[in-house]
Image (cartoon, rainbow, N blue to C red):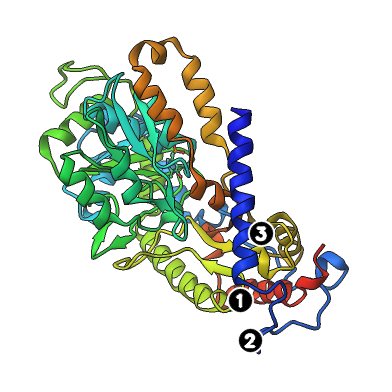
């Protein structure tokens, strides 16, 4: 493993160094758009661009209606969805969310991880089967595959979008591939036309991990409704937040019945135990808190898109910063995170963490998101499990190990900068200007970054 890590790191540094030498000057002259060029960086003792605190998510969305709804649920004594299966908060949420997304059905679950896991089970995915997915994701994605003792096979990313690459998926398909699980990372669309073409060619179902992508649209359709099944998360940091919570959407009657049954410990809507399933039900408090947000969630989604488009229109003019690529046909994004790529060649060759420290000091809370190498950790753990040793052939283990070679993913983990979008992208234009000015200021002072 260590040897492998080293070689992959080396590959990345060689790649960066060679492209730097070939294509770009070390010092990029400031353009006329750079505003705060004379101000000293806050990290060096200057005044920060912004001192005003940013609102906190999800505390900022607590309102009277939410408190009243939770009180009403508490007083009703109906705390489980089975107490009121038709008009309870979970059942009402399911109807409303299906209508909002354009899906025929929605089933609530206790988390996004559970939603994905229920889909894996509903597609009869078993030990010995493979699911192709992205390693640039929350661990919940992978966990949902591992819970069925199925084998996650990673396909590399399309670097500028950070999304799983359809061509890489095509190369990983085997007779054991039972599903493709694309992740709409940051809340923006994967290249769904290309992914569905690969999936349809091989008759493989697609489970969309839209956990970060509520309401986002691609070619007029909401993410989560393009594959056979789509999954969402309402974890506390998400754009619709309930502490924990999740949902599956889909159009196929039989499959969505199965989804319901599996999340209800294998018991169908008629009360008959028909299959294996854990108890993964959303509870009425979660339903209540989600319902309180739904209408405003749509307004907030629109506001985030407006602000993100404004940010991108400015950030793309700062050398070395490139907003996440949105595929042709993307109508909107969920913007769980606003993301851009940092190219150190334009910033006096300083590492991303130096850039981030300077940006944070200017009052912009930005970070690096998912750390590299998490797929290597998974690999080591999985291969130690006796169930995995028993269920997979040497050829499959090799396929799995080979799928851990992810040069684009490694590059993404080292170069992406994210701004948590839940609260921040709901700000005013002046708030967005603070972000832009901070970035411009860091760029203008790049030669003093060390
Ligand atoms: C892309 C992605 N997939 C899956 C999950 C898992 O969702 P949850 O945390 O609700 O289990 C998350 C949540 O963080 C996510 O962002």
Quadrant observed for ligand 1 in the rendered image: top left
For the residues bearing labels 2 and 1, Cβ distance under 8 angstroms? yes
Secondary structure found at label 1 = loop
Determine the residue positioned at 39% across, 42% down: 155
Among numbered discs 3 and 2, the one appearing first in the sequence:
2
Q: Quadrant of the N terminus?
A: top right
Say which element carries label 3. Answer: loop
Of 403 and 277, which appears nearest the observer? 403
Determine whether the residue tagged by mark 2 lies in a helix, strand or loop.
loop
Decide if ligand 1 comes within 8 Å of the CB at mark 1.
no
Whether residue 145 is situated above or below residue 273 in the rendered picture: below
Q: Is residue 89 visible?
A: no
Work out how far the residue at label 1 is from the one at label 3, CA to CA, in angstroms.
Answer: 18 Å
Q: For mark 2, does the 10 Å Cα neighbourhood hold few (<14), some (14 to 19), or many (20 or more) residues?
A: few
Residue at 60% x, 35% y: name it. 5
Identify the residue position indicated by label 1 in the image: 318
Q: Quadrant of residue 361?
A: bottom right
Residue 213 percent across, percent down from the top left:
38, 53
Residue on which the image places disc 2: 33
Q: Quadrant of residue 188?
A: bottom left
- Percent x, y of residue 179: 26, 35
- The residue carrying pointer 3 sits among few (fewer than 14), some (14 to 19) or many (20 or more) residues within 10 Å by Cα, namely some
- Mark pair 3, 2: CA separation: 23 Å
Q: Is residue 197 above or below residue 322?
A: above
Residue at the image point whose x is 40% and y is 23% from the top: 397
């Amino acid at each position: 493993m260590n040897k492998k890590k080293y070689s992959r790191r080396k590959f990345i540094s060689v790649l960066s160094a060679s492209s730097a030498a070939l294509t770009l000057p070390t010092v990029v002259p400031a353009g006329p758009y750079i505003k705060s060029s004379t101000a000293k960086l806050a990290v060096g003792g200057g005044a920060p661009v912004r001192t005003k605190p940013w609102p906190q998510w999800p505390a900022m969305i607590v309102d009277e209606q939410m408190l009243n709804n939770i009180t009403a649920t508490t007083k009703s004594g109906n705390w489980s969805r089975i107490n009121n299966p038709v008009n309870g908060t979970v059942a009402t949420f399911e109807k409303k969310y299906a209508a909002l997304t354009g899906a025929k059905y929605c089933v609530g679950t206790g988390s996004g991880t559970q939603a994905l896991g229920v889909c894996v089970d509903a597609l009869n995915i078993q030990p010995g089967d493979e699911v192709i997915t992205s390693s640039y994701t929350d661990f919940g994605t992978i966990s949902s595959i591992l819970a069925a003792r199925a084998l996650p096979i990673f396909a590399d990313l399309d670097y500028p979008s950070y999304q799983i690459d359809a061509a890489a998926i095509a190369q990983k398909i085997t007779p054991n591939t039972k599903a493709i699980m694309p992740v709409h990372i940051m809340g923006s669309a994967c290249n769904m036309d290309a992914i569905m073409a690969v999936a349809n060619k091989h008759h493989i179902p697609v489970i969309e991990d839209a956990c970060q992508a509520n309401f986002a649209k691609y070619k007029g359709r909401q993410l989560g409704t393009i594959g056979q099944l789509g999954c969402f998360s309402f974890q506390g940091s998400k754009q619709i937040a309930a502490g924990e919570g999740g949902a599956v959407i889909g159009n196929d009657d039989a499959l969505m019945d199965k989804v319901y049954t599996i999340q209800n410990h294998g018991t169908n809507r008629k009360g008959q135990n028909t299959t294996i399933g854990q108890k993964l039900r959303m509870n009425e408090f979660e339903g209540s808190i989600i319902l309180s947000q739904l209408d405003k969630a749509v307004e907030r989604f629109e506001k985030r898109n407006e602000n993100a488009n404004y940010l991108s229109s400015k950030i793309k003019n700062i050398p070395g910063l490139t907003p996440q690529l949105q595929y042709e046909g993307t109508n909107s994004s969920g913007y769980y995170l606003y993301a851009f790529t940092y190219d150190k060649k334009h910033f006096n060759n300083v590492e991303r963490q130096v850039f981030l420290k300077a940006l944070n000091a200017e009052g912009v809370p930005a970070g690096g998101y998912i750390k590299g190498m998490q797929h290597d950790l998974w690999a080591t753990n999985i291969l130690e499990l006796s169930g995995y040793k028993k269920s997979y052939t040497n050829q499959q283990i090799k396929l799995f190990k080979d799928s851990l070679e992810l040069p684009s993913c490694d590059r993404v983990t080292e170069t992406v900068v994210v701004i948590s979008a839940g609260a921040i992208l709901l700000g005013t234009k002046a708030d967005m200007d603070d972000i832009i000015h901070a970035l411009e200021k860091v760029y203008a002072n790049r030669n003093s970054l060390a």
